[in-house]
Amino acid sequence: MMEQEPPDVLSQREPASPAAAPADFTDWVARRLPPLEHAARQLTGDDAQAAALARELLGLAAMRWPRLRGNDAEHHAPPGAAADRLLQRLFAREVADAMPQHRVRLDLDRVPPTRRPGRTLPPTAAEEAAALWRRGRATTRRRLLIAGAVGAAALGATGIRALTAGRDEDPRPLPVLPSGSAGTDGVDEVPPVARQLALPVALVAKLPRELAPGDPARLPALSARPTPRALAVLDAATGPAATGPLLVLGEDGGWRRVDKLPAEAAALLSPGALAPDGTRTAVVTADELWVVESATGRARRYDVTPQSPVVVWLGPRHLLVAVDQLLEVTTGRLLAVPVGVRDAIAPRRAAGADTPTTVLELLSAGDPITAPPRVRSWEFDGRNHSEGTVAVTGPGAGRLGQFLGPGFAVVGGDLVARMCEPTGLVVRPGWRPGAAVVVLDPGAARVRRLLAADADVTGAVTLLGWLDRRRVLLRCAGGSGATPGVDQRVLVWDVRDGSLALVATVASVGDLSLADLDGAV
């Protein structure tokens, strides 16, 4: 008998009939399944794997459908717009994981060729959608594995801690999952939007309380008014269908408009796009990598083909693009590395610009299907490499579902933060935690603290990095009660006691990336 998995907390608000898919979901599936399955077939080269992958990704959208529908309504977007964005992100991760020799793109507006004989859809789109709806609302949260299984190996604490050795800041030990004032059972909670705005204020040196650059057309171009160091990069989008341009906040408190990039670059701004020292910003377009220098405003296109919109700075001069593609941005050289960007952790608050020799990864539970969450450490010297993997154990390990988005390690603090889909958390009326920030001690492979969020209540949470060795930066976008001018809130979470503070509000719905800041004053 299969072991019963924890109940799906995202299914608590669904209609009583599990078989009936909503009409808007059915319509979306009818439009998106054919091009998705076509792209999946190009990726896998196998009909059965392509069919399974396409339905796995659509099932993940089914799990989030109420939230995706609400996002469309809140931003007056066409039905299915948020689901389309999710599907593109999920498929991009599969492409990055599979590392195909040829370019594979998901074109949702493509009408694929007629299907091969013997490979037909169920009689109606309604039946297909109903099957996906049942699957998505069930307990499964695992994605189809394209790459091979990851071997398990013993990993000593010494090897991982070498990755996070650095400046000695405030050596007081951190507690292991103490109960925060706003959480239960060792889990802190992001408060609703109104309470976020009423949180105590954390003043950060040189960072304005209101990130409100105004009309981008009235701002000076970065190439005409460069800055030695950028504190923030913002997509100045004012609506769900709008993008950019990218805006840079200099150390002098003034905003600049990035004027040397393709227009579509703003739409793919990653939370880790800005280098830790603020000297460069890396952005990915459909098939190009660009790096903008803060000190000159110049944008350079590199002759590499990114496999994911995610970029990971391993230092101020070294950008991880893909396996065997560690870009030295000053020279354009590509260095050999054994790891890709999907699960790599970006070190923050590190000194020096030496070529990195270690990389840390956080690997999700269920990937491969029987695996627990794991910490993997790589050591390499350009010719040889070694790795060690250890399972995350102890209190809180069972709450970690699929890891999401980029992760950040704080050098000198021996801690790693990353978003995940939590499992087994308490659901109550008006609260269904669908995302969480987890902080782990990679040397001990144990969870230190968890911060849960309900996007409908709190806004969608994105991890931005570390303010210092004990405080995590995050942003909350939208959410019930959000008003124009405070579309997003930048918060700081203290992992010692679970307290939260408000750093800034953001007058844009676009993405945001922060450099290493100087800390609270």
Image: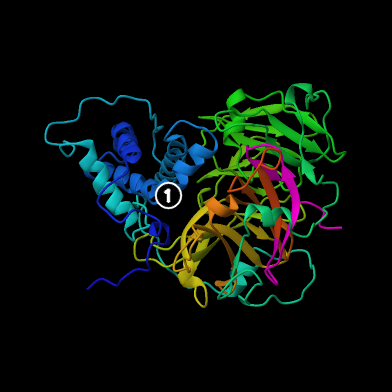
| First to last magenta residue range | 493-521
Q: Nearer the viewer, residue 372 or 72?
A: 72
Q: Residue at x 61, y 35 (%)?
A: 283
- The question of residue 216 being in magenta is answered with no
Q: Amino acid at mark 1?
A: Arg
| Residue 377 at x, y percent in the picture | 55, 63
137 over 365 or under it: above or below: above
Q: Residue at x 26, y 48 (%)?
A: 20
| Residue 345 at x, y percent in the picture | 59, 55
In the drawing, does residue 268 fall left or right of residue 58? Answer: right
Q: Residue at x 54, y 39 (%)?
A: 74
Q: What is the tally of numbered marks visible in this picture? A: 1
| Residue 504 at x, y percent in the picture | 75, 48
Residue 13 quadrant: bottom left
Q: Nearer the viewer, residue 465 or 235?
A: 235
| Residue 378 at x, y percent in the picture | 55, 60
Question: Residue at label 1?
Answer: 64
Residue 440 seen in render: no
Residue 379 quadrant: bottom right
Residue 44 seen in render: yes
